[in-house]
Image (tube, rainbow, N blue to C red):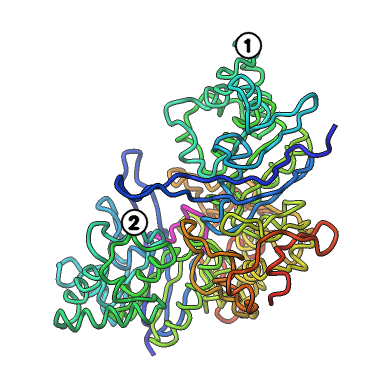
Amino acid sequence: MSHLLEIKNLDVKFDTDEGRIIAIDNVSLTLDQGKVLGIVGESGSGKSVTAKSIMQLNPGNTIYNDDAEIIIDNENVLKFTSKNDLKKIRGGKVSMIFQEPMASFAPAIKIGNQMIEQLLLHKETEKNQAKQISIDMLNRVGIADAEKRFNQYAFELSGGMRQRAMIAMALSTMPKLLLADEPTTALDVTIQAQVINLMKDIIKEYNMGVIFITHDLGVIAQVADDVAVMYLGSVVERGPVNEILKNPKHPYTRGLLNALPDINNLDAPLKPIPGNIPSPLDRPTGCVFRTRCPEPTHDCKEGNIEMGLIEVSPGHWVDKCCVNCG
Amino acid sequence: MSENIVSVNNLSVSFDYQENFLSKKQKIKAVNNINIKIKKGSFFGLVGESGSGKTTLGRAILGANKISEGNVIFHDDERDFDLTNISAKEMKEYRKKAQLIFQDPYAALSPRMTVRDIIAEPLEVMNITSSREETDQRVRDIAAKCRLNLEHLRRFPHAFSGGQRQRISIARALVSNPKFIVADESVAALDVSIQADILNLLKQLQKELNLTYLFISHDLSVVAHVCDIVAVMYLGHIVEMAPSRELFSNPKHSYTKALLSSIPSIDPENKSRAIELIGEIPSAMNPPSGCVFRTRCPNPTHDCSNGKIEMGLIEVSPNHWVDQCCVNCK
């Protein structure tokens, strides 16, 4: 069976006044239908840039490498340039949910009109039909009084409700792939729990593939089937969620897990990862994690070791430099 | 000399609200009849969803919000400050003793000032130091305590990462040698590894400088780790208050239980669903009568769903206080 999404050797660079920044370095990922791939990492690790590359939503100064491929339905969407082709992925086959729901709705257009607009663009529907689909979808995500909400503006809804409306909007075109970029980060824990449960139900019901970006490993543990851990533009470890969280091999993954306050063990000290994430302008040569690695071997300190994932157990891939580090 | 540093007695804070210039003026009670005592040297946690009144309470204790009813008393070594009727001169004195650390380290620092000037500003505004040399000395001392390099002091905030910026905000709050700090969501905007670093720093500074914290957060696992005592707020009321170990191992109020179960477990095999609270926190403009939690309570008893039960904390075990309405709800 072919994969729903296949990202091969993706490099993303940004041209800025201060120089060329490497945002993504040689990332390869796959996602099957009905599965949730979680991407975790600190801010600046390239999680969002990876997702945005799929829809080509990165800004104008972005440079993709020529041999990179992002394959959806046997088509390399990275080579799409015409408006019609892009329309097929942006909102058609792929939908995206953003972190801040207030910033992603147009403030002066009614929510209903925004929902209808995208349905008319991507699906062959009549206006009345589109309205019915939208209201059904709003009902489906648990918005009470859907017909009333349909005629309201984004500022009239609370944070949790806005995020539900955003999910309803993203799903109404029945995309094959959903990109969720920190969809629960701005919400309170109780609302976060509601939204996570809702997303789990909907993913199952529609059998779509989801890329779920978050920095919260607890959320990942609850929703994802597979996890990719990113650091400074590189995937340093990936594999099934159980394996990554219970048997992490990379010192960065272990560092993230140790830094997390554990509600079941209040005596455990909080262990931050030493040092700061380096600026992308002076990205370390060789292994990108070597400047913060707790026990770097002599070789990687010099920056002579190339990065690259090796398979340590079925489906569990770790960067070869760090597989034996502390 | 009192063992408490702050006593809050029957405190309420209301705001005036008018929908438009023709409609009637309303009062919104953001904080309702709060009684807390903060012990010297403690790490007092305040948790709750957005809109529960955590920040308003913190600001009222700092004298940054007007107090509508009740009082707040700050016990200094020599004297007490009563914040309900405090003169402008006394307020200046109080500001040296009680300071605030903000949530967003990107918004809290002026981009046009060097780090040295940012940290020195409180000293200059409060006329604490008499010469530039003395100011510089104090800035350098506190910067070193907050693990900032001397070389950092010459730079502007844009050159720093989120964690470093938060250390600058902490240094600024501590430079006037305060005794009491309100940390309002001070780690919410940070990545987990940096969050751990800042929490460790706050703990360490507490020991070195004999500080007392009021730590406001919506993240229960963070609060569980750093705080000695925790109060849970809902819609302007404290619904449960206990030493943190007691609260997290033996929560009594259904809201606390729901909050605890909402923390996503790090164990992928533990997929137990959170106790889902129906709906969202009601608007403070027309809060439910009686027990404010009854509209979202999973198992309200008949009495409280009519809104007939008054709110008020009762002590169920030593130092463990729960709202009397919900003490028996499941």
Reading the image, the residue beneath label 2 is A103
Kind of element beneath mark 2: helix
In the image, residue B39 sits, relative to residue A202, either above or below, namely: above
Expressed as whole percent of the image width and height from the top left, the position of residue B122 reads 58, 23
Residue occupying the point 52% across, 76% down = A224
* Residue type at tag 1: Glu
Expressed as whole percent of the image width and height from the top left, the position of residue A59 reads 28, 53
Reading the image, the residue beneath label 1 is B133
- Viewer-nearest of discs 1 and 2: 2
Residue occupying the point 76% across, 29% down = B76
Q: Residues within 10 Å of mark 1 (few under 14, many from 20)?
A: few
Magenta-colored stretch includes residue A45: yes
In the image, residue B291 sits, relative to residue A6, either above or below, namely: above
* Residue type at tag 2: Ala
Q: Chain of mark 2?
A: A
Dominant secondary structure, magenta: loop
